[in-house]
Image (spheres, rainbow, N blue to C red):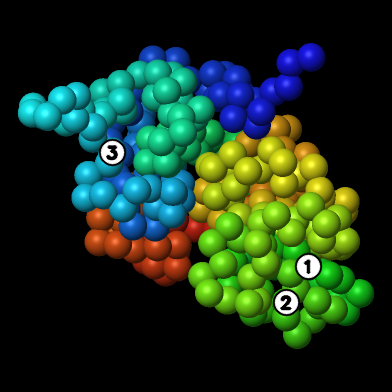
Amino acid sequence: MIILTFSKKLYDEALKYINNETLKDYIIGLGLSAALLSDGRCGVSYTLREDTLGKCEEFFKCTGDFGNPVSKINPGMRVKEVLNIGLFSPDPLIRSVAYATLNAVFSTNEIKSMYSLGDLSQYINVNLDDTVGFIGRIDPLINLWKPKAWDILIFDRNRKGSDEILPDWAIVDLLPKCSVVVISGSAIVNGSIDWILNYVKTDKVAIVGPSTTLVPNVFPVKLLAGINVLNSDKLFKLISHGAGTKKIIAEKAVEKVVLIQ
């Protein structure tokens, strides 16, 4: 039996939205990466910096002791080639650029017409009967829902020294008990979405964040909350200066949107 990963499902779906477009440019920032296609479509992804080796140069690799380091992804490449190389790559930076490119691919007028403006909190009701499980530390929603929910459980691979954050292996036993589940879009980028969804036992589930791939009929969740790029030039400049999600929204380089399935 062949099991299709979400990476493969997304790749197959993306092929419906590309022809001969190329990757015009990309940027890898501290928290976010972005990609711009030759036809003007633009997308964002979380930069998987926790999975890098901490070296001063990782995206470009040396082929020997001397010479000019090269990368597997470069401006001018066909988008299909970028996706084929990057969506399945174990390299965290190549993967980050590839998923930004993927999100740009799905930034079409057809899919944008399905967007609703606003924040995820407008589309999920949380009350004292709910235990809310967060995959990834999503502080704005955590702070908003703490007074409203019975309990908040936060799961993350990097606990950052906080006893409030549970290790990701606790998902297996505790996530099925959650009546509301919110998954960071970075789980799409690092591939953990495939096993996380196996432990979701509620219909009140959403994927949220700038990395969220806004495409219908791929993920078995009702709500996909991500961003729509309004100004790619401003976005690239902000990311090059170290901006994260709050800043690019505040500067109106992007806007929050929700795709309801």
Secondary structure of residue under mark 1: strand
Q: Nearer the viewer, residue 135 or 239?
A: 135
Residue situated furthest bottom in the rendering: 147
Q: Earlier in the sequence, mark 3 or mark 2?
A: 3
Compared with 251, 240 (above or below) is above
The structure residue drawn at horizontal position 37% and vertical position 41%, both measured from the top left corner, is 93
Few, some or many C-alpha atoms within 10 Å of disc 1 (few <14, some 14-19, many ≥20)?
A: many
Q: Across the whole image, how many numbered discs are drawn on residues?
A: 3
Q: In x, y percent, where is residue 134?
A: 69, 63
* SS class, disc 3: loop
Amino acid type shown at disc 2: Trp
Q: Which residue is mark 2?
A: 145
Q: Quadrant of residue 198?
A: top right
Which residue is identified by label 1? Answer: 132
Tag 1 and tag 2, C-beta contact below 8 Å: yes
**Which residue is denoted by mark 3 in the rendering?**
59
Above or below: residue 122 compared with residue 41: below
- Residue type at tag 3: Phe
Q: Amino acid at mark 1?
A: Val
At x 28%, y 38%, the residue is 59
Judge from the rendering whether residue 84 lies leftward or rightward of residue 261; answer left or right: left
Q: Position of residue 7 (x, y in %)?
A: 59, 30
Q: Of the residues under marks 1 and 2, which one precedes in the sequence?
A: 1
**Real-space Cα distance between discs 3 and 2?**
38 Å
Left or right side of 107 for 260: right
